[in-house]
Every structure is written in C-alpha cells, then in structure tokens.
Image (cartoon, rainbow, N blue to C red):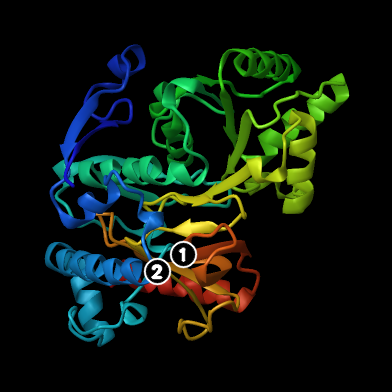
Amino acid sequence: MSRATSIPQPAGADQPPNEAEAQSPSVRIIDARTAIDELIFAEDPWYALPLERQRELSDALIRQALREHLERCPSYRDYYARSGAAEPGAVALADIPLVSTRVFKFADLRSVEAHEVERWYRSSGTSGQPSRVPRDRASLERMVGSVHGSVGLLADWDEDEVAVINLGPGREHVEDVWFQYVMSLIEALYRSESRVPRDEAALDEIIGLAQSLLDDYEHLIVVGPPFHVLDLCEHMQRRGVELQAGEGATILTAGGWKRFGGRAIPKQEFRAVVARQFGLRGEGQVRDVFNQVELNTVLFECEAHEKHVPPWVHVAARDPETLQPVPEGEEGMLSYLDASCSAYPCFIVTEDVGVVRRGRCACGREGTRVDVLRRLESRAAKGCALKMGQIHANG
C-alpha cells in the first residue's frame, strides 16, 4: 500500500549553515510509489514476511537497482564491463561486481548529478582518512524509512509513551558526520533529549534525566555508542546508583568501540553490566544496531541479539582472497548489496569479518541475519582491500 510519510532532513541541507543552526530541520513528504518504497514504507513490517518472499523481493529489487546504477553511473558501468559479469538480468547476486569501501576514501562515486546530492557525509575518521559518501533525497528518505520500518524489532511502542536520551549531539549539531546523523534519527520518532557525557557533571545530569523520564513515560530508550553507555554505567556504580527500570527501558548501542577499543568488553559481559545498573528485567532489553557510512540501511537487533537484514539488502560473507561467498555460518569478509541507495552503487565489500545465517531466528522470525565480529586482521587481506580500492577509484 502506498502511503505518505514525513522525513526529517539533515540541518543545513537546504539552507546556509548560519540559518541551519537557528532553525529546526525541514520536513519533506514522500509519496511511496516505486516497488522498493512500497516495501520500506509499508504499514506491515518486512520482517513478518516468509523467508522465500524476502528472497524473491531481494532478487528483484537489487537487480532493478543494478540496472539503474549501470545506466546512471559511468564509472561503475565501465568497471562492470571490465569485470566480465553477466547481463543484469542473468547475473547471480553473489557475482555482482563489488566496490571496496576504500573507494570512498579516494574518489567521488555517484549515480546522480552534482546538484542532486543533498550532502556528502563522512565517516568519523578514527582510523585514518575518512570516507566521503553522497546522499540524494531519495537515499536519505529510504534510509530514515529503514529506521521507521525496523524499529519494531525492538518493541511495538506507542510513540507518545516513549522518551529517548541520545548520548551524543542532537540533530541540529550533526553537520556531515554520518554516525552522528544516524544516531540522531531516533529523535524523529520519539520525544528526545541529547546529552554528550563529556564529564562527571554531564553524567550526573544524565542519571537524573533518566530517572525523571522513567517516572514520566511508559518507556525510556537510551541510545549511544557502547563506550558512552559503559561510562554511564560505571559512573552510576561509583555513585551507588541502580535505576529500577524493570521492563520500562531499552538500551540501544551502535557504532562499536572505535578508538576506545582498549576498553571493549565481551558482549555478554557488557549486557550484564548495563542490565544490572539500569535494573532491567532482562538482558534482552540491551540491543545493538549496525550501520556504516557506505551502507544506506540500519540493521536492528532482535531480542535474541541477532541483526536482521531487510529484503532490499543482500549480505554475504566472502573469502578475503577470492571474494567468493563462504558456506553459511562460516566467517568471511562482509559484503552488502543495498537497493535503497540511489545516490551511488551501494554494492560494497567491507573490511569487517562476520557470519551470515538464514532461516528461522530464535526470536521466531524468518529471514537473514548477520553477526559483525571484528575488523580484518590479516595484513595480506588489508593490502588486497587497499589495492582493490585504488584500482576502482582510478579505473
């Protein structure tokens, strides 16, 4: 069913920076008419579909996206021709030529005219040169739609009964850092407060705010990178504070540990610490989401701590030497084919190692799930990724 939905735009997308600071982000209306928009903005959630239907949709949507990018992106069209891949209607999804995420460090890859780019977003740049990725209006709308359409994996809340604490800058201060923009999107769904836990005074304020919102709302969501959440929990422990949230809170992490990797603790230990300090009913209320600047879809974790992949995205784990898919359940270098992106060919191979599983999840839902385990550690594999990125950028 086609329907209209309001989509928040990044501050400054259509106005000078000095005005963007003083005004709230603009809101546009999209009327979902295309097949992919019908799915992303559907009333019924995609994760309720049977696995076979999800596979059918994935095949059709990605092939259509491939045709469009071959038509509109000359550099990808040339690269596709050099690869020797079959025609778009006949090529297997596993054989669609992939773009290394390294490309976005060296080149401006896009399938739209320059004036159609709403903004160039960059990665946080914590590990060297940042990636720069274009987003046009449709890509941003669909990306926001992926959040709207997948948040039900967390729970089915009444929007008026939920409050959010975002452990980071609000949307008006996001600028062009993609991670911060993604984290701020939940502000479009619920009543939100943004706080950066930069010191003990700020952490004390966040604790007080959390208690106040737990008193005033049916449910509280605390969202932030895991190192900020851990900082908050350790501060609560030092202060002798244990909130009694029960079933009334969800703690949502994203972004990994980045430059704070030295403080990283195992996932189960992390969930136990958070559940204890917030007084949660169970560790199923501590969830994680995944995204990266080169990927146009946010992947949400269910109560079984599995990240579900929507049907407009095809994910595969690949051998880092041959780039061929490895058997299901085995570790490999993760690749994504994301049909929701119209600004550039989002057919990417990353430097993340993970596992892909298909079938029925422990949560009861059918579909594809991905477990992102770690970054590439092999020097040879990293060198291969670097070389691949440079070839694509210069090709």
Task: Tell me the quarter of the picture where residue 387 sits.
Answer: bottom left
CA distance for labels 1 and 2: 5 Å
In the image, what residue occupies the spot 68% across and 34% down? 229
Task: Tell me the quarter of the picture where residue 285 sits.
Answer: top right
Question: Is 56 left or right of 153, judged from the image as shown?
Answer: left
Comes first in the chain, label 1 or label 2: 2
Task: Please state which of residues 265 and 211 is positioned toward the viewer in this rendering.
Answer: 211
Task: Please state which of residues 324 and 110 is positioned toward the viewer in this rendering.
Answer: 324
The type of residue carrying mark 1 is Glu
In the image, what residue occupies the spot 51% across and 25% down? 169
Question: Is 324 left or right of 234, judged from the image as shown?
Answer: left
Q: Residues within 10 Å of mark 1 (few under 14, many from 20)?
A: some
Q: Is residue 263 shown to the viewer in this render?
A: no
Location of residue 265 in the rendering, given as x and y in whole percent from the top left corner: 77, 50
Q: Is residue 394 shown to the viewer in this render?
A: yes
Q: Residues within 10 Å of mark 2 (few under 14, many from 20)?
A: some
Residue that numbered label 2 is attached to = 51
User: What's the mark number on residue 366?
Assistant: 1
The type of residue carrying mark 2 is Leu
User: What's the mark number on residue 98?
Assistant: none
In the image, what residue occupies the spot 75% across and 37% down? 275
Location of residue 311 in the rendering, given as x and y in whole percent from the top left corner: 35, 62
- Answer above or below: position of 177 versus 108: above
Q: Are marks 1 and 2 in contact (CB under 8 Å)?
A: yes
